Image (cartoon, rainbow, N blue to C red):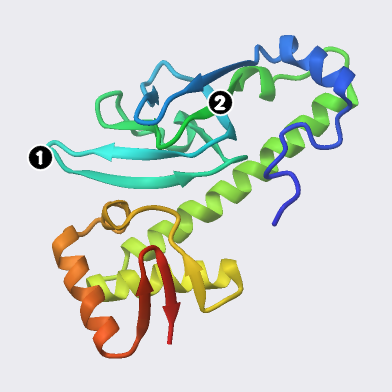
Amino acid sequence: MNICKKNLFYNISEENQSEMMNCFHMYTKSYNAGEIICYFDETDKGIGILESGKAQVIHYLSNGSQTILENLNEGDIFGQLFYFYAGRENIAVEATERCTIQFIDYDQIIKRCSRACAHHSQLVHNVLCMISDKTQNICEHLEVLSQRSIRERLNSYFEILSAKYGSKTFELPFTMSALADYISVDRSAMSRELGKMRDEGLLKINRKKITLL
């Protein structure tokens, strides 16, 4: 795991952090579970960092269904710059439990610092580390969605989680309903496929805990 991922202010003193809060137009806001944190409308140029709690990036489809694009945990970064094609009406970040978000004006990050201060460069480096980690997560999701069948999508995602946990036993980061939204399949069809995989001795299921056999 990249050490920058979970700490925007890695290697920056508390004194410099306070100074940068104003310089970078940062502010912090809390949200309750189920509350919309933001929409990715074309006027939004900021980025958000999850200081605590959990959230999801959700794509709302015109037919009333939805797909979970990302599952966000403490330290994760999000923003419209990662989904530049999105309109306000179809992609949003929603809190799945009470969470605290730190918002930063992206233009303030990329502009040249007038004083060429070292902590500005360090913060830019930290943000780039976090963006790199997010890019990897997005690529992993695309890999899952590129699979043709429900079973292939499940196997692909389970293999990713197994590698991250370093174990054949791992816990899903969300509910079964959310898992169906994440791999973009019908929940009932997914449940049937999981049942078949269990009956064939391919895996064990205990609520959200999965063991690959």
| Residue 96 in the image: above or below residue 149 | above
Sequence order check, earlier mark of 1 and 2: 1
As drawn, the residue found furthest toward the bottom would be 200
Q: Secondary structure at mark 2?
A: strand
Amino acid at pointer 1:
Asn
The image shows residue 132 at horizontal and vertical percentages of 62, 48
Whether residue 78 is visible here, answered yes or no, is yes
Task: Tell me the number on the disc at residue 101.
Answer: 2
- Position of 39 with respect to 109 (left or right) is left
Residue depicted at x 58% and y 66%:
164
Per the image, the residue denoted by label 1 is 63
SS class, disc 1: loop
1 or 2: mark nearer the eye: 2
Front-lying residue, 61 or 84: 61
Q: Quadrant of the C terminus?
A: bottom left
- The tag on residue 212 is none
Answer few, some or many: residues within 10 Å of disc 1's Cα (few below 14, many 20 plus, some between 14 and 19): few
Measured as percent of width and height from the top left, residue 200 is found at: 26, 90
Q: Nearer the viewer, residue 66 or 43?
A: 66
Residue located at (35% from left, 86% from top): 202
- Position of the N terminus, as image quadrant, is bottom right
Q: Residue at point 37% right, 80% down?
A: 204
